[in-house]
Image (tube, rainbow, N blue to C red):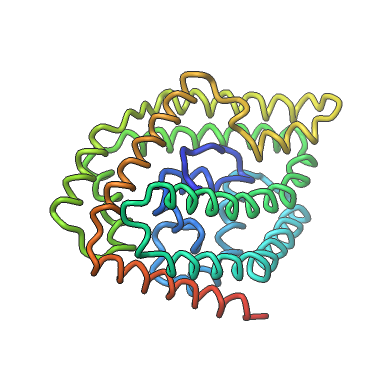
Amino acid sequence: MSTAITLSKRPSPIAWIRDHIGQRLPWLSLLALLCLTSACSSVRLVYGHLDWWLDHKINNYLDLDGAQEDLLSQRVDEFHRWHRQTQLPRYADFFEEVAGQVDEISGNPKMLEELEQHADALWENSAVMLVDLILPLVLEMDDSQIDQLAENIREEREKSLKKWEKSQRKREKQFRKESERWLGDLTDQQEALIDRQVAAFDFDPKVRDAQRQLWAKTFLGTLRSKPPGYEKTLRELAINPQTLWPPEYQKMHDKLRAQATTLAEEIAGSATPEQLAHLKTTLLKYAADFRILAADTN
């Protein structure tokens, strides 16, 4: 938008969202700002259930007791209200701004880079807010709850590893689906671009898994031992996990980002007038949905 992509960074419960919508084409990653899921068909419908969705996903990691669960629900509701009231108007402004510049996107790599940076900044606001609301719950967990957190992280890591070992053909379809969401029907040339670039992506899921293991070991070790200033350390690990990226993973991340950027630039550069019109209409539709959602006080 995620974000916004970018390579997945966080295996932690407090940053589950960014870990699962991460791999996006730079300018298509704007989708991460819509409803925190790539499968949404209606922004307003899905966003209305954002609090339930977050509560459910976080509970997949945290083994909380009754009082802690109640507090989690309160924190999630607080995040939802904050996001609706303060962030959605900013998303609407951003999408309207992009819609007004659609005709300049084609063949303008610099503009694509600026849009990605803006989207990343918006996404980071939400990630920081969510961490600051949920991390205190994590800090209060007892040893048995930390043990369960470690097991849940391990299971989720293994599931993620299996997902990345799926066929190349499925990844091609996913990239096409996201492109079609914004541009409408793709040309034969654009489909060929996607197939060629996805086939060339240099991604090793085992390298990513090793990075996630290192993060989990460091986070959980700090949570258990509670050294001086551990609260600040855990917050930094949750918000900026890249501080633990090994050189091999950093190299792979940078190469993947460059490949995704090239693909985004090629698709944008080949966009037809009809596709640009479709993109503008879609952006304005989402912006209108954001305005309606932001005005809803229920």
Judge whether 60 appears above or below 298 on screen: above
* In the rendered image, the vertical position of residue 27 relative to residue 229, given as above or below: below
The image quadrant that residue 187 belongs to is bottom left
Residue 230 relative to residue 29: left or right: right
Q: Residue at x 63, y 80 (%)?
A: 295
Frontmost residue, 118 versus 100: 100
Counting from the top left corner in percent of width and height, residue 166 is at 29, 37
Residue 108 rendering spot, x and y as whole percentages: 37, 51
Q: Residue furthest left?
A: 188
Identity of the residue drawn at 43% across and 68% down? 99
**Could you say where residue 27 lies in the image, as x and y percent from the top left?**
41, 52
Is residue 298 visible in the rendered image? The answer is no
Residue at 62 percent across and 28 percent down: it is: 243
Q: Is residue 271 left or right of residue 161?
A: left
Q: Quadrant of the C terminus?
A: bottom right
The spot of residue 32 in percent (x, y) is 48, 56
Residue 217 placement: quadrant: top right
Give 173 or 89, whichever is nearer the viewer: 89
> Taking the image as drawn, is residue 124 in sight?
yes
| Rendered residue at 51%/19% (across/down) | 247
